[in-house]
């Protein structure tokens, strides 16, 4: 950390000879340590220093890729998924194509983030980088099948925990509900939909013990998170959805 302070404080040298060129390499090494010991809050001042630096976009590409990878992961753990997607996508796209192992490592975090933003990876990408553990998860979310999603998460639980993304993947459950309820809404072809219709859909997907009260709670959460535009009429036990864009794209929800 002392070396980083020396580099960051160098104001006397000419630009070509400035110690500030060494900042990013030191930051990346500190990131590795902080992630290893789970002290991610210590990353914040380092990120601020780099983001405010005049050298921000002029460091070597390999160092920028590493920096964006770690900052993207930090955003992911902070549940700032749009920012995480931006940084991780940069890291993946700019990573040397010959560094297959590194690109795969970036995808382990980029794929869950993209799924949470409603962007499902192509199966060919999963096959290319040997990440087929995500295949069943992806199809379950798309189908709105929570029962199958839970099976997939349980099946690959050890792998996802080792990768540090299990809790992030659990957040896909609310997306899965949203996708199922969107299908119900399209089938009903009305903006006033009985809560019971959603409960029936959940039971068809293997959620046998769900009742209307639990379904209403799920819907209320979806409305709160802006994944459904509408309100619950408790008097009539119906969800009243907006006539325009009742299920906003996840990238803007």
Image (cartoon, helix red, strand yellow):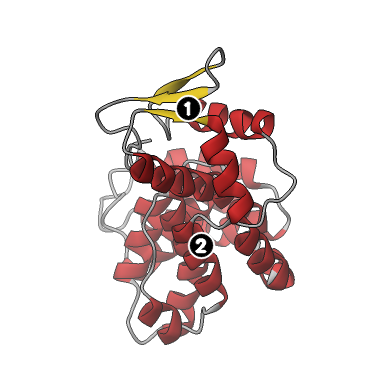
| Residue that mark 1 sits on | 223
Q: CA distance from mark 2 to mark 1?
A: 27 Å
On screen, residue 30 above or below 130: above
Element at badge 1?
A: helix
- Whole-percent x, y for residue 80 in the image: 47, 41
On screen, residue 186 above or below 204: above
- Whole-percent x, y for residue 97 in the image: 32, 82
For residue 248, what is the image quadrant? top left
| Residue that mark 2 sits on | 109
On screen, residue 200 above or below 193: below
- Name the residue located 31 percent from the left edge and 58 percent from the top edge: 17
- Whole-percent x, y for residue 101 in the image: 48, 82
For residue 50, what is the image quadrant? top left
On screen, residue 185 above or below 235: below
- Name the residue located 60 percent from the left edge and 28 percent from the top edge: 216
Element at badge 2?
A: helix
């Amino acid at each position: 950390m002392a070396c980083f302070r020396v580099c960051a404080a160098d104001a006397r040298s000419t630009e070509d000879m400035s110690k500030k060129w060494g900042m990013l390499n030191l930051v990346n090494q500190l990131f590795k340590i902080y992630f290893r010991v789970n002290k991610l809050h210590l990353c914040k001042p380092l990120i601020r220093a780099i983001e405010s630096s005049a050298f921000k976009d002029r460091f070597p590409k390999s160092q920028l890729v590493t920096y964006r990878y770690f900052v993207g992961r930090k955003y992911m753990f902070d549940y700032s998924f749009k920012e995480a997607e931006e940084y991780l996508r940069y890291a993946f796209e700019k990573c040397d194509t010959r560094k297959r192992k590194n690109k795969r490592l970036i995808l382990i975090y980029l794929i869950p983030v993209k799924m949470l933003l409603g962007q499902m990876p192509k199966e060919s990408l999963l096959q290319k980088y040997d990440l087929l553990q995500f295949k069943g998860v992806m199809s379950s979310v798309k189908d709105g099948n929570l029962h199958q999603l839970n099976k997939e998460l349980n099946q690959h639980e050890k792998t996802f925990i080792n990768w540090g993304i299990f809790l992030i993947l659990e957040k896909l459950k609310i997306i899965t509900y949203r996708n199922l309820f969107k299908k119900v809404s399209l089938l009903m072809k009305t903006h006033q939909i009985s809560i019971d219709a959603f409960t029936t859909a959940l039971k068809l997907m293997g959620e046998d013990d769900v009742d209307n009260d639990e379904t209403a709670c799920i819907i209320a959460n979806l409305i709160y998170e802006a994944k459904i535009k509408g309100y619950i009429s408790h008097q009539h036990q119906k969800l009243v959805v907006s006539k325009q864009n009742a299920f906003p794209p996840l990238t803007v929800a």
